[in-house]
Amino acid sequence: LSLHHVEAERERCERWKCEAWNNEAQAMRHLFMRNYHLRALQAILRWLRWSHRWAPSQADRKEEFSAYTAGYERTRRAQQLRRLPSPVQACSIVHPDGPLQSSEQFQPADLEDERQLLADLWTCLRRGELSKGLKLCAESGQAWRTALLQGMMPFAKADNVSYDITEAAGPDEETEEMLALMKEEHTDWTEFGQPKHYSHGNPWRKLWKEQCFDSAVRNLQSGSTMDLCELSIYGFCSGNYDALMPYCGTFWADRCWGELHCIKEWLVERLLEDGHAWRGEASLCEIDEDPDERDIRSRKLCGRLDARLSPDLGRAVAEEVQQALSRVFPRTSGDAYWEVPESVSEQFSLLQALLIESAWIPQSGQAALDLLRSWLQGGRAPFLVKQFASYFARQKEMLQVPRSIAAVQETQDACDPQVDDIIWEHVQELILAASGAHWQEQCLHGKAVEIILEHCAVLQPELRREAFAELLLRVGSVGADA
């Protein structure tokens, strides 16, 4: 659904015309319109952020974070009492880098509050809740950290912040609203839907990002006292893979998010670097620098997608995604696909990995369908499994990679997957449910017939007629009024 939604966004934005780039926000909108790889990464990351927020493991977690103050107030007061009558000089350690430079002089409770703030901030970034993260820092006594994070926002003119998008309407309006809300609440600096109270961005964003990268590199060295969570936040801001991944844990979805976030960061910087033809005469970043400095910054921020390492950007992105998923969900053989694990949870994780990979590798979409078929074998699959399989099969067009993407693969072109057998399983379940003892309520007053026809619409004509005939034969055959 997320992949479908970003493509629908692009179609609704067709009337937006791009002129020569004069700021990064405008450039980001143009890249969204023109680059499939960026849209696919944004859609998948959006889904990974949303699924983290609403995962069963988060069900018992409170929506609002606990109240605490991370402004080092206890340390400040202790220093003032200890060194009267010069309280100003006594509090010289109380600054943003104080805990890194002189942690022994801070009250343990202050350090614990800061660790809790960093953990909660990380959760906000992981979920794409940028506005909540900025507000959390400001209200917890670390407004300087709010200002730090605002440095990631691309610069935009006052009258050039959002698209002029045609409103969506039709039978999928509820789904469109849900996906639009997902985008608004689980966003990213690279998306044109910006957090509320968005300022007009940072004209020196690239310089800010390079400083975050350098801070992460320094604190990756032995002897650093920086908390691992804070280090990962610098990795998040700069796309520094080595700094981000250690805090992503072992759960496959968290690691997948970290891997794809870095690829997305590298891709954005590479596309901005390659957009010479659209820049006009003005620079997107107000930095007075020589070519050598710009070259060094590009190597840092473009990562493994740097032009010197990956001249063919489309192929490089597809390979990076495939390698990232192999690290997250290791393959157990040299085959093209993963072997199906035994546990149910791992099988569902495998399906999710295949769905992600199918955005670039056509055969993975077919492998996902094959996995669903294996679940349906024997006719004993639960109703929810059949329902999920059918809804997924109906979105089969999402499995087909555009020709421009398939062309970079040394594989056969994506073919139209045959999904009648998968959908037919669910249609039969729906017919049985609709023709039971309460068929009048289900069919005449409810939406049972509409739901059945919705699934039948993608079946071959013969199966469609068979389903309709079976429904007519079964309706009214059981119950008191049979």
Image (cartoon, helix red, strand yellow):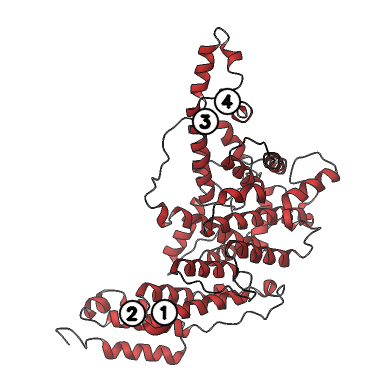
Find the distance from the CA under tag 2 to the CA under tag 4: 66 Å
- Labels 2 and 3: the sequence-earlier one: 3
From the image, tell me which residue sits under label 1: 455
Location of residue 344 by image quarter: bottom left
Disc 4 on helix, strand or loop? helix
Q: Residues within 10 Å of mark 1 (few under 14, many from 20)?
A: many
Cα distance in 3D space between marks 3 and 4:
10 Å
Residue kind at label 4, given as amino acid type: Glu
Of label 1 and label 4, which has the lower sequence position? Answer: 4
Whether pointer 2 and pointer 1 mark residues with C-beta atoms closer than 8 Å, the reply is yes
Q: CA distance from mark 2 to mark 3?
A: 57 Å
Of the pair 420 and 326, the residue shown nearer to us: 326
| Label 4 sits on residue | 104
Q: Earlier in the sequence, mark 2 or mark 4?
A: 4
1 or 4: mark nearer the eye:
4
Is label 1 in contact with label 3 (beta carbons under 8 Å)?
no
Question: Residue at the spot x=46%, y=82% of the render?
Answer: 458
Tell whether label 4 touches label 3 (CB within 8 Å): no
* Horizontal side of residue 41 vs 305, given as left or right: left
Mark 1 element type = helix
Q: Is residue 17 visible?
A: no
Give the answer, above or below, for where 423 lies relative to 300.
below
Q: Is residue 81 left or right of residue 236?
A: left
Q: Amino acid at mark 3?
A: Leu
Q: Along the line of sight, which residue is nearer the eye, 387 or 230?
A: 230
For the residues marked 1 and 3, what is the alpha-carbon distance in whole angstroms?
A: 56 Å
Q: Position of residue 459 (x, y in %)?
A: 45, 85
Q: Which labelled disc corresponds to residue 111?
A: 3
The answer to the question of whether label 1 and label 4 lie on touching residues, with beta carbons closer than 8 A, is no
